[in-house]
Amino acid sequence: MQDKSFFGFLKIRTKFFLAFIALVILPVMVIPVYMYQKISGGILNIEIADAEESAIQYRQVRATENSQLLKNLQDYAHWDDAVNALNKSDGAWFKSQVFEYISKHYGYEMIIIADKKGKVLWQYGAPIELSDDISDTKFFRNARSGNETVVYEQYEKSAIMIASANIIPIAAEGSPTAVNDAVGVMVCGDKISVENLVNISVSIGHDVAFFNDNTLVASSEYTRTPEPGTLFRDVNSEAFRQISSKKQYTDIQPDYIYLYIPVISDEGGVIGAIRLSQERSWVDLIKRELYVFIWMYSIGLFASSIIFLVIMSFTVVGPISQIIKLIKNFNKDAGTSDPLMISRSDEFGDLYRTFHSLISQVSAHDKELTELVRALAKSKEENESKIAEITKLNKFMVGRELRMIELKKELKVCTESKQVEIKNGKPT
């Protein structure tokens, strides 16, 4: 039964071409785009993961600095000489042994010595708000309750890491009654400054900036960010919204990935944000190289497919067409053959020779049958001629016999009539 479907009407070359379009051209057009998008997405995920890892490193570095700040402070606050100096109201000792030494060797920008009630006795670099009384501050209350820790607070539009510890004798350190033995409170603060952020930047390998209320406070990168104290204009509104909600936020830009970490005070308010900057120039280079590689690979695949199609056309489609031609026109071309097809040693050559031999045999039998038909027709003509002669002779003989019968009847009648006349004596 004839195949009347769409593909049933197509030539085999056309089918090969359609298969080539479906299996090669369309994938060559679609796969590079798909691969580029998937790989680009994977690279972006790696970038984001790297930025988030930088945020973890930042928090670890900051936690280490806070721990070191508190330890350095406790080394001076839990000291018998500090207790004696406070009891003697020896401000000169604190100035020389604490203020000058700590600021010089540790770089801390604020030191406060207060009594047990929070009245400031001596201070170095303290903001105006902390220069007289600190009794209402969270860090003072923390120290007096035995919770010596580090908190973030904002003073003079800057975030300060503030550690507080009770001034106690060394022997009272770790004692449950240490708070009662305290003669005062020592406070040490370190601003989020350029030097501070540069050290962190070196540790985590990314630029670090701190801003508050659209204003840049400090940055580890001088050539790309504005001067401290100026507006920080390249922070988008979504970043501000996420920071206000106390959430970490990742902002993906063409040249940089920015990760914003809100800085939250001990009271729970947002006092600013840290921004980590991750450059994307290497990513663009990888994407360009990847883009070139994918398209060069696709072009190579397309060219290889064209060559494959041409080879298939000559090695498969061509021989099949020759075999089909041989089958269709075996009566007309029975005596002819394609030398190239006859000489082939592959399966197509075997198939062509088999069909050619079969067609030759069919053709020879056809000729014999034709000769037999012709001989039979000639014999038929001769037999028909003889039958006609016999029929004619038969008609003649039958007529003669009929005539003889009639003559016999007439003779009989005459004889009988003669006998009657003789009998009656009246012969004629």
Image (spheres, rainbow, N blue to C red):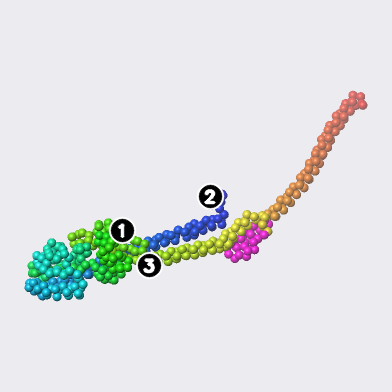
Mark with earlier residue (3, 2) = 2
Q: Name the residue: 28% across, 67% down.
A: 219
Quadrant assignment, res 115: bottom left
Is residue 371 in sight in this rendering?
Answer: yes
Disc 1 vs disc 2: Cβ atoms closer than 8 Å? no
Residue pointed to by mark 3: 282
| Apparent side of residue 178 relative to residue 202 in the rendered image (left or right) | left
Q: Is residue 313 above or below residue 101?
A: above
Mark with earlier residue (1, 2) = 2
> Which residues are the magenta region?
336-364
Mark with earlier residue (3, 1) = 1
Q: Which mark is residue 5?
A: 2
Is residue 316 in sight in this rendering?
Answer: no
Residue pointed to by mark 1: 236
State the count of labels. Answer: 3
Measured as percent of width and height from the top left, residue 387 is found at: 77, 44
In what quadrant of the picture does the C terminus appear?
A: top right
Q: Amino acid at mark 1?
A: Asn
Q: Name the residue: 26% across, 62% down.
A: 215
Measured as percent of width and height from the top left, residue 338 is found at: 64, 61
Mark 1 or mark 2: which is in front? 1
Measured as percent of width and height from the top left, residue 311 is found at: 56, 63
